[in-house]
Amino acid sequence: MSEILLTIDGKEVRAATGMTVLQAAQQADIHIPTLCEHEKLESFGGCRLCTVEVEARGKKSYVVSCLYPVEQDIVVRTRSEKVDKIRRVLVEELMAHAPDAPELVKLAEEYGADRNRFERAASFCILCGLCVRYCNEVKQKNAVGFIDNGPLKEISFIPEIAARECWGCQECFTICPTSYAQAAYLLTEALAFPGSRKVQAQKTHTPTIIPIIPVAMSG
Amino acid sequence: MTMPKLQSAAELERYRAEILAGRDPALPCIAVCAGAACDGMDSAAVARAFLAEAAHLGGKLEVRTTGCHGYCEKGPNVVVTPGDICYFEVAPADVPEIVAATLKGEVVERLVYKDPVSGEKAVHMHEVPFYKHQMRLLIGDNPKIDPMKIDDYLAVGGYAALVKALTTMSPDQVLDEVKRANLRGRGGGGFPAGAKWETTKKAADKTKYVIVNGHEGESAAFMDRAMLTGNPHKILEGLIIGAYAIGAQKGFMYTRHDMPLLEKHVRNALAQAKEYGLLGENILGSGFDFECELHFDVGIFVSGESSALMRSIEGNPPEPRPKYIRTSVSGIWDKPSNLNNVETWANVPQIINKGADWFTSIGSEKSKGTKLISLSGNVVNSGVVEVPLGTPLRTLVFDIGGGVRDGKTLKAIHFGGAMGGSIPADLIDAPLDFDGMSKLGAPIGAGGLLLMDEDTDMVEVARYLMDFLTKESCGKCVPCREGMAQMLHILTKLTKGEGKPGDLEQLEDLAEVTGLSSLCALGKTSADPLKSMFRYFKPEYESRISVQAAGGSKAR
C-alpha cells in the first residue's frame, strides 16, 4: 500500500491509500466530531457532522470526512467559519428531535447551537442508523430497519425477527445516542408479543432498561 | 412475421432501400399524435375514426399513430403529409371531412391554426408560429414515425449513424467526434458527455456499463418522455454507438414504472432491434456485442439521481451514495458506468452522421446543439419545444409560447423544476445557455420552463416546490431530511400569514447548510428555488414578515 501525504489543519499527515480523511485525522490525533460513525460499521455519511473543508487541485469543497478518500497533497481544514456553521445548524436540526441527548448537548456547547432554534419534532430518533446498521452488519439479524422516506423516515423493529432475536442481544440500546432504539423495541414488544418479557425473564436474567432521555419536558 | 437478422451494414442498407421503394411519398398520410397530452384528450378515438375511414379506401390513405408532435396545447394534433398540413383540436367528428379534403388535395380551413389576435391562418407546419421559431432536430421525426415500427425509423435514416460508426470509425474516433462536438449532458448538469465517456472508457475494469437515464422526475418536465415514447430507436441507436466508443458490453434503460405506453414502446424497440441484429452478438457483422435491458424505478424522485439509479439497478433501495469516486469509474456493481440522459443519447446519432463541425455550428459559444424544453405554466402554448441553445428566452416565451395566458403580465420564468430557480420578467432577453442561466440562478436543469403571471405568489411557489422535494427526499442525511422539513415549515407559516421576525434569517441559514452539506444533488439543490427568490423577490418575502410583525392581517 502506497503512502499518501496530506495536510490536515496545517499539520502534515501520512496516510495509506484507501483510508478516509477521518481515519487519517484520527490517526494524527486530530478530532473531528461524528454521530453516525462506529468502529465496527461501514461509514454511513448520514449525519454530516464530520463535514470538513477540502482543497484539492485549487478547488475548495465541503465533504464528509468519513467517506472522502485521502488524496496526495490535499489540504483539509477541520474547523472554519463555514464548517462550524454547518455543524451548528446540523446540531440545531437534530436538537429539534433530541435536545437532551448527551452527545448533542456537548456538541451544542462546542458549536454554539441553540437547542430551541427550530420547531420541535415529534420523534426523538435522529436516524443515525447505528441500530439498523449494527443489527445488519455485526449481528446480521436485520431485526430493525428503516421504513418510509424523507421526514417520515423512522426505524422499526420487525416483530417476527425481534421476538426471536432481540431478548438475548439488545446491543443496539447502548450504542443509540438518544435511547430511541430501546423505546422503539419496547413499543414493538408491547404491541406485537406482549407478556414475553415475563416468560423470558424467568428463563434468563432481565436485560437492563436504560433510562429514556426525557424530551418533551425541556426546551 | 419475423425478420432475418441483418448480418452486415450492406444488408441493412439494402433493407432500408426496400422499405423506401415500397413507400410512395405522394401517398397521403395522416399522422395522429398519441403523445401524453393528446392521448389525454382521447386522440385514440380520433385515430380509430381515421383507421375506420381508411379501411374502405383501398390503400389510398395511410394512417399513422405517432409520438408527441409538441403542440400539446392544441391537441389532439393531426399532421397530413405531403405538405405537413397541421390540424388542431381534432375530434372524431372532424375525421370524414379531413379524409375527404385530403383525398382531393384540399385543406379543411376551419381546423388549421388561426392567430388569436390577427385571425391570420397558418396551414403548413413551417408557417405555424409555435413550430416556425423552432429547430426540431430531435423531435422533428416524431410525426413521421410509428414508435412501434422500427421500419419507420429506418425509413427516416435511422441506424445509419450506427452503420457509419461500426464500419468506418474506430471507438476512439467516435469518442473524439463526440468530444469535439462538445455535447453537454442534457439531464441537468451540462457536464461534457465526451469527457464522461472517456472516464469510463479509460477506467481499468473491462466490464463497463452504459445507462440511459429516462427517469424524468423534474416537475414540469415532459420532453424526455416525448422523445423516449415517440422515437425510442433514436435513443437506443445513440446508446449502442456510445457503448461501442466506450467499450461497454451491456446497457440499461432506466425509466419510470408509471408510463405504460412508454414501457410498451421501449420493450418493443429493444425486441425489434434484437430481431434485426442491432443488439446482441456481432452487431451487423462488426464483431461488437452489446445487450440492453429495461429497468424501472420504485416510484421515488431520487431514483433519477445517478448513484441512486445505479443502486436501484443493482436491486438495492435507491439511496444516493457520495460521488467522491465518480460513477463513471465505479458505478453499477462497482463497475465503470456511464450514464447520460435520454436527450443526450438522442443527440449522438446526428453528431456521428453529420459531424462535430456541423453540431458546433448550432448553439451558443459554450452550449452547442439544440435543447428540448417543456413549456408550461401560465403560457398560451404549452408543449414540447426544441430550439438552438443560445435562443433568447423571449423567443421561447413569446414567439413560440405565445406569451402569457389571459392577457396577463409576465412575472417570472422558472427553470429546472423543484431544484431550479426563478428569474424576473425583465431578464427575458437572456439566452438559453447552460452557464448563463446558471449564473442567473435559474439553471436550465433538464429543461422544464414554467411561466408565472402577475398573480403568482412567489412564497407559495417556493413552499410548493419544497413540499414536493421534502416528500421525495430519501431521508438518509440530516441536512436534506431535517433542513428541508424545517424550511417547509417556515415557508408554510409565511404563506399562512404566520411569519415572524427571524424567519428569513433561519431560511437563509437552512438553505446554505442544506446546500453545502447534503449527500446528493437533491438536497444540495433543494434550496435553489428559494435562493433565487431571495435574490430577485425578497421584498415579497419581507412583506410577509413586516406586515405581521406590525400586527397586520394576512398579506395574501
Image (cartoon, rainbow, N blue to C red):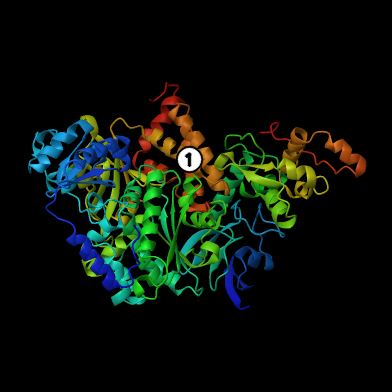
How many marks are shown on the rendered structure?
A: 1
Position of residue B317 measured from the top left corner of the image (x, y, whole percent): 56, 51
> In the displayed structure, would residue B272 be above or below residue A169?
below
Q: Nearer the viewer, residue B110 or A67?
A: B110
**SS at mark 1?**
helix
Nearest to the observer: residue B241 or residue B381? B241
Q: Residue furthest right?
A: A202
Give the crowd class for mark 1: few <14, some 14-19, many >=20 residues within 10 Å. many
Q: Is residue B356 left or right of residue B472?
A: left
In the image, is B405 to the left or to the right of B148? left
Kindly tell me whether residue B187 is visible in this rendering.
no
Please identify the quadrant where the N terminus of chain B is shown: bottom left
Q: Is residue A171 left or right of residue B551?
A: right
What amino acid type is highlighted by mark number 1? Leu
Q: Which residue is denoted by mark 1 in the rendering?
A: B507
Left/right placement of residue B43 relative to residue B106 reads right
For disc 1, the chain is B
Relative to B330, residue B92 above or below: above
Q: Residue at x 40, y 68 (%)?
A: B243
Give the percent coordinates (x, y) of residue B133: 17, 49
Which image quadrant for residue B260? top left
Quadrant containing the C terminus of chain B in the rendered view: top left
Q: Nearer the viewer, residue B400 or A216?
A: B400
Does residue B261 appear in the picture of this structure?
A: yes
Quarter of the image for residue B423 reads top left
Residue A22 at x, y percent in the picture: 63, 63
Rendered location of residue B514, percent (x, y): 51, 48
Question: B95 and B83: which one is in front?
Answer: B95
Residue in view at x 26 percent, y 43 percent: B33
